[in-house]
Image (cartoon, grey):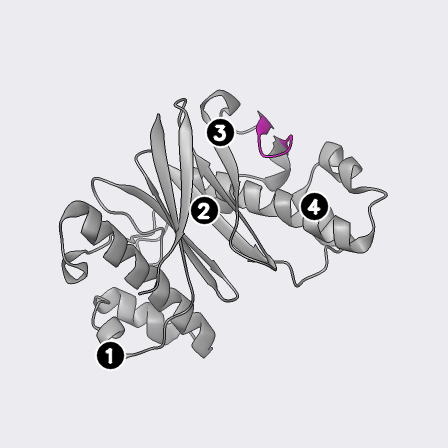
Amino acid sequence: MIECLVWWARPLPGEARYLALLDEPERGRFESYRREIDRRRFLTGRVLAKSVLGAQLGRTPEAVRFDATCDDCGKPHGKPKLAGVEFSISHSGERVGLAVTSAPVGLDVETETRRAEDNLIAYTLNETEQAALRGLDPDARTRAFYEYWTRKEALMKATGRGLKIPLQSLTLDGARLAHSADPALNPATTHLADLDPGEGYRGAVAVLTAAEVVVKEGTWEG
């Protein structure tokens, strides 16, 4: 059995004490965002991860340095990595999340403010899953869609391949991967769980392991 810890935080202000925790490439990414809320969410994800992982590894947050090299282009905008631990960061709206465990992991959180339009459903869900949404009223359809969306996003993030895995290649049965047409995901070695980011949000975490996984959620206050 392994444990997966999920921490939720709200976007931090862009104060000097937090900005001091960013290394040079991270500061460049922070400054590249045009909207303040995007800057704050990025900053919070890094500060949250460095604080939690630093405590776990016996380091100060300042001593934690991630490798975010993109596998495709070599630029520092890929999924952050740190030797000795598996983690995933996600943010949406006023939620920033961090999942930490000992196996490949993917975390996703989304606001439910956008309606589930037909073209978005067709892009995300295969025919079997689309059939499950037919007949639902608009609100119920939106809730059901975002359950599918966050689960699939979490699965793809756990592989490290992201949208290189077609969304429709994955078939879900509730919070369970029933079938994958992509070899990066095997239902027998995939654990998927819904999360509770708060009202107006949907969240899910995927851990790639055959072991039993216990998921615990908490709030990080900075």
Q: Using a 10 Å C-alpha cutoff, classify the residue at mark 2 as few (fewer than 14 neighbours), some (14 to 19) or many (20 or more).
A: many
Find disc 2 in the rendering and name its residue. Answer: 107
| In the depicted structure, whether residue 34 falls above or below residue 169 | below
Horizontal and vertical percent position of residue 108: 49, 49
- Of residues 150 and 28, the one nearer the viewer is 150
Horizontal and vertical percent position of residue 110: 56, 56
- The disc, 1 or 3, on the residue closer to the chain's N-terminal end is 1
Find disc 4 in the rendering and name its residue. Answer: 144
Find disc 1 in the rendering and name its residue. Answer: 16
Q: Using a 10 Å C-alpha cutoff, classify the residue at mark 4 as few (fewer than 14 neighbours), some (14 to 19) or many (20 or more).
A: some
Q: Is residue 165 left or right of residue 173?
A: left
Q: Is residue 76 among the parts visible in the rendering?
A: no
Segment tinted magenta in the rendering: 172-178
Compute the Cα span from label 1 to label 4.
41 Å
**Of the residues tagged 1 and 3, which is closer to the observer?**
1
Horizontal and vertical percent position of residue 145: 68, 47
Is-magenta flag for residue 175? yes
